[in-house]
Image (spheres, rainbow, N blue to C red):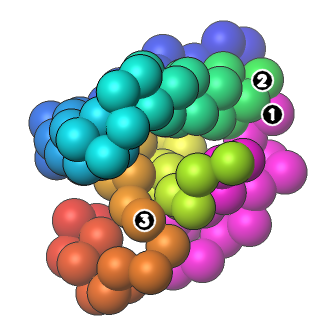
Amino acid sequence: MTRQLIIRPEAEADIAEAFSWYEARVSGLGSEFLRVPDAAFNSILRNHDVYPEVHRNVRRALTRRFPFAVFFVVEETRIVVLSAFHVKRNPQEWEKRV
């Protein structure tokens, strides 16, 4: 069964904030960053079970190249992305979104 991917507004804001931060450092780096969560989303849709549960029913997908983690929950018909956090941020911030 194919599940629908839902990206919460908070997760979109996380990604937009990271894009702006990377783009301010080096022109074009923000665009390169945007490929990372997109690849993670595709991987999550293909095989969400490979990602570990890290809090209650929340799973975490670590990204390549950029130190980010995508936190998501799997429901019967959809996958909901809660956040896309830099791994050095306080984990209690994303846990508030559960």
Name the amino acid type tagged 1. Asn
- Mark 3 or mark 1, which is nearer the start of the sequence? 1
Question: How far apart, in angstroms, are the residues tagged by discs 1 and 3?
Answer: 22 Å
Q: Position of residue 10 (x, y in %)?
A: 16, 46
Dot in front, 1 or 3: 3
Q: Which mark is residue 47?
A: 1
CA distance for labels 2 and 3: 23 Å
Residue at the (42%, 65%) spot, across then down: 86
Q: For this rendering, which residue is in front, 29 or 50?
A: 29
Residue 86 is tagged as 3
| Quadrant where the C terminus is found in the figure | bottom left
- Callout 2 crowding tier (Cα within 10 Å): few <14, some 14–19, many ≥20: few
**Which residues fall within the magenta stretch?**
47-64
Quadrant in the picture for residue 97? bottom left
- CA neighbours of label 3 inside 10 A, class few (<14), some (14 to 19), many (20+): some
Q: Position of residue 89 (x, y in %)?
A: 35, 79
- Residue 46: numbered disc: 2
Residue at x-position 50% and y-position 73%: 87
User: Which residue type carries mark 2?
Assistant: Arg
Q: Residue at x 45, y 32 (%)?
A: 29
Res. 22 in view: yes
Vertical placement of 44 versus 59: above or below?
Answer: above
